[in-house]
Amino acid sequence: MTTTRTKPAPKTPTRNPNAPPAVHYRVEVVNLHAHLFGITLTIAAPAARQVLRLPVWIPGSYLVREFAKNLQNLSCQQGKKTLAAQQTDKATWTVDCAPGQPLVVRYEVYAFDNSVRTAWLDATRGFFNGTSLCLLVEGQQDQPHALELVATEFIAQWSVATGASAQKINRQGFGTYLCPDYDTLVDCPFEMGPFWSGSFVACGIPHRFVVAGAPPSFDGDKLLADTQAICEAEIRFWHGEAIKNNSNIRKNGEGSGPIPFKDYVFMLNAVGDGYGGLEHKNSTALICKRADLPRLPRTTLAPTTPKQPEGYTTLLGLISHEYFHTWNVKRLRPAELATYDYTQENYTELLWFFEGFTSYYDDLLLRRAALIDNATYLKLITKTINGVAQAPGRKVQSVAQASFDAWIKYYRQDENTANATISYYTKGSLVALCLDLTLRAEGKTTLDAVMRALWARCQGGPMAEQDLLDVLTALGGRSFAPDIARWVHGTADLPLDALLERHGVQIHHEPDQVAQQLGLRVKESGGLFIHQVLRGGVAEKAGFASGDEWIAVQPTGSSAHGAWRLQSLDDFTLCTGNAKKVTAIVSRDKRLLSLPLTLPKASQAVRLAVKDAALVDAWLGPRTAATSTK
């Protein structure tokens, strides 16, 4: 018999908690009006040939954005000696270092992208993600990283909000933050400015909400109350009764109970026109229209209790979506994204699950939190169903392929996008809807239970499609592989009508909007401009092209009346009456073209309504008491 002796694993050296972090970033404002941050990077023990890289993308936004284009004036020193930094590609530098001495790297970053993905700096506000400002020190990604945010004279009166763990900060939030590794550092955006700030506790977890750019009419108390209802509904969705044991918090930043974070920060930038969000492990960066914020009752002029703007429901859906990502994509995530490669695209076919299923639950949990009613929820689903049905690309590309191609298609939309691809957000949410209604109809389980089982199976970590199939088989009592193959990897339409009707929803068919009947997407700003021409539509057959300005229309046989000027599509039916054929006059490259347009039979859109309230409630689930947005 042969005996194999296993060598004991080497002991990991114990790090001195008082030792300075291996990597230290000092971030300060260099020139407020030139939108320049200054960064001083100190590497305590650099490699002999130290490689520095700036990420080319940020997790959660699947596009190579070339953040290095905003980096300038890079210089390196060891002691008093200036070292050369050789740039080896668009975002990589190497520095030859002497042993035993810290390396100090100084550079500036131009910050003037008012989005959730990069960095911004002006006289009213500062914001940044670490992927835009913090060079990655190759070989030391897993070492502790500190970020020191300096309160220079330009911004001394500002406040700071971030999900990063504070080491030593002042009352406003300026000072030093400590992260266990590079991934954690760049997953914690920083918001700076004279913002509004409020807080609440959800299921024992402290939450902070800050809003930059809020107008005087902003009702912060309402936003806090409604967001608290969302957070409590989502925590209970994932953890149920187990949240009662979440009172103790580990020092590493993760909850000792089932909730996987010890605090959370919402950072909302209210602007004239904008919408979006980016998820992080214990925070999110959001952007919305200022007009969509909840409003205080008016006490001057004609005192009123205002009806909340329609866009407020959209904002709450965005908040719900990004908060749901705290579990579904930031922890439970595609196996291909178990570790991030910041130098290039990271491909996965699973965005239909991580973005699509999150899109299904974002509005559903608004309804369960009693922030919207059944009719409003069905109206939101109606919009999604019609949006998918009106995209010819659904017959061209599967939602799994759309996930893989996000880097070149979803995030690079053009005049042909609707014809060539399908959104993994919208169709993915309808896949979740079909799966949930199928599971409920078969009576063995629900999608809620499947999501919680996936969380337990994958231990809140990397997940593959096979994990979903295995959980569906275990809980649903049969294989769902054929369903996933058809709905996710195929291009056939989803069986929505039958499933919705079985769960108490009545489906009405109504004439589509004029643009859809013509096969067009238009922009109406200073004229009527063609944005997209849909595949197979009458506009394509007539010869319309993206970029055309549609100037006038002349019904066939009505020459005595001449052509009619168009300012918007609302003018189209006014000027054509019941004509079956018209001549469209468009301007293309400063040439006037006459296009023969044959009007089609009216295409149909759907509208959903409650038919059997008991069946609808059985699907949508119980509602908890909360403030209504109506």
Image (spheres, rainbow, N blue to C red):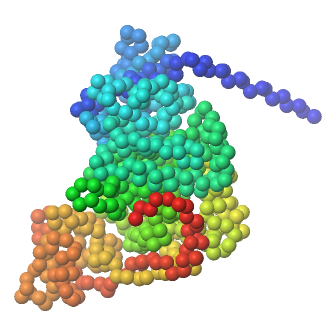
Identify the image quadrant of the C terminus.
Answer: bottom left
Residue at 50% of width from left, 13% of height from top? Answer: 99
Q: Position of residue 135 (x, y in %)?
A: 42, 30
In this rendering, the answer to whether 34 lies above or below 213 is: above
Residue at 50% of width from left, 63% of height from top? Answer: 370
In this rendering, the answer to whether 254 lies above or below 548 is: above
In this rendering, the answer to whether 623 lies above or below 99 is: below
Q: Nearer the viewer, residue 276 or 622?
A: 622
Q: Nearer the viewer, residue 493 or 627?
A: 627
Lateral position of residue 109 relative to residue 388, left or right: left
The quadrant in which residue 547 appears is bottom left
Q: Position of residue 324 (x, y in %)?
A: 52, 53
- Furthest toward the left, the residue is 560
Lateral position of residue 232 relative to residue 480, left or right: left
Lateral position of residue 356 relative to residue 10, left or right: left
Residue at 77% of width from left, 26% of height from top? Answer: 8
Q: Position of residue 112 (x, y in %)?
A: 28, 39
Q: Nearer the viewer, residue 517 or 148?
A: 148
Residue 407 in view of the camera: no
Q: Position of residue 215 (x, y in %)?
A: 28, 48
Residue at 64% of width from left, 54% of height from top? Answer: 240
Residue 299 in view of the camera: yes
- Furthest toward the top, the residue is 80
Lateral position of residue 326 relative to residue 56, left or right: right
Q: Nearer the viewer, residue 135 or 524?
A: 524
The quadrant in which residue 313 appears is bottom left
In this rendering, the answer to whether 294 lies above or below 490 is: above
